[in-house]
Image (cartoon, rainbow, N blue to C red):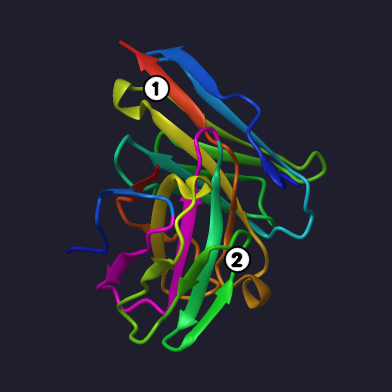
């Protein structure tokens, strides 16, 4: 039972253009969503997050949008840079009192940004 | 500033052998986690700990054991290695249950042959 899904295994974009990575979830109890970035041979690193009470969060070139009714979130990277090439994981968390910070991850999307 | 440190980085085990994956964090985090990542899959939680002496199972605990005798260390033990345990293992820690991001180690790539 995959509660968090990233249906696009890979995405290729040109430098300077927008990258849009998508994520769908099934559990309406998730209250926090996070995006992690992972380079080869390294652990995932936190990128940006959004609470379920918001619909948008922005941090520099990165913006995450949340559509609760559709149970969908997306990560926008504008403008995309070659250094953004990595695997991006979407993750979701249940409310703090019951989750103990445990995360449910999607399968990941490999982003390649071409110069 | 070490963060989360995992050892070893790579290991090849024979079926039936045992080993311990080490994980240490220097951020005084109470919450620690072990995840595994299989090819083309997301990370799946094996075990987690909310503090020294307290551990609990995650999604995929079978074949593994953990202990948490100190705040800093959270070793993962494989008793009888099986090919299905071939994976990349990540240890992570976070400051509190309601905290947002977890900090991850660099991973241990384990192959069971």
Looking at the image, is A82 positioned above or below residue A88? Answer: above
Q: Quadrant of residue B51?
A: bottom left
Q: Residue at x 68, y 55 (%)?
A: A52
Chain of residue at mark 2:
B
The answer to whether residue A16 is left or right of residue A74 is left
Dot 1: chain letter: A
Q: Which quadrant is the N terminus of chain B positioned in?
A: bottom left
Q: Position of residue B52 (x, y in %)?
A: 41, 87
**Residue located beneath label 1 in the image:** A80
| Residue B21 lies in quadrant | bottom left
- A55 part of magenta stretch: no
Number of callouts:
2
Assess disc 1: are there few (<14), some (14-19) or many (≥20) residues with their C-alpha within 10 Å of its C-alpha: many
- The x, y position of residue B6, in whole percent, is 28, 60
* Callouts 2 and 1 on one subunit: no
User: Is B69 in front, or is B65?
Assistant: B65
Disc 2 designates what residue?
A: B58
Residue positioned 37% across, 63% down in the render: B18
Name of the residue lying farthest toward the left: B1
> Circles 2 and 1: CB distance less than 8 Å?
no
- Which contiguous range is marked in magenta? B16-40
């Amino acid at each position: 039972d995959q509660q968090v899904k990233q249906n696009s295994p890979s995405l290729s974009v040109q430098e300077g253009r927008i990258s849009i990575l998508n994520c769908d979830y099934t559990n309406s109890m998730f209250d926090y969503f996070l995006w992690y970035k992972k380079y080869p041979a390294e652990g995932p690193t936190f990128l940006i997050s959004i609470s379920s009470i918001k619909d948008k969060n922005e941090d520099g070139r990165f913006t995450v949008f949340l559509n609760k009714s559709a149970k969908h979130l997306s990560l926008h990277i504008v403008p995309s840079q070659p250094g953004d090439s990595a695997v991006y994981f979407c993750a979701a968390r249940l409310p703090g009192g019951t989750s103990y910070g445990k995360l449910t991850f999607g399968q990941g999307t490999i982003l390649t940004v071409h110069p | 500033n070490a963060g989360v440190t995992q050892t070893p980085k790579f290991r090849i085990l024979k079926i039936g052998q045992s080993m311990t994956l080490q994980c240490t964090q220097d951020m005084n985090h109470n919450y620690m986690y072990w995840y595994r990542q299989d090819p083309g899959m997301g990370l799946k939680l094996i075990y987690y700990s909310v503090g020294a002496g307290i551990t609990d199972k995650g999604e995929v605990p079978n074949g593994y054991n953990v202990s948490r005798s100190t705040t800093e260390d959270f070793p993962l033990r494989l008793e009888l290695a099986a090919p299905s345990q071939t994976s990349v293992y990540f240890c992570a820690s976070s400051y509190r249950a309601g905290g947002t991001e977890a900090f991850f180690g660099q991973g241990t790539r384990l192959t069971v042959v």
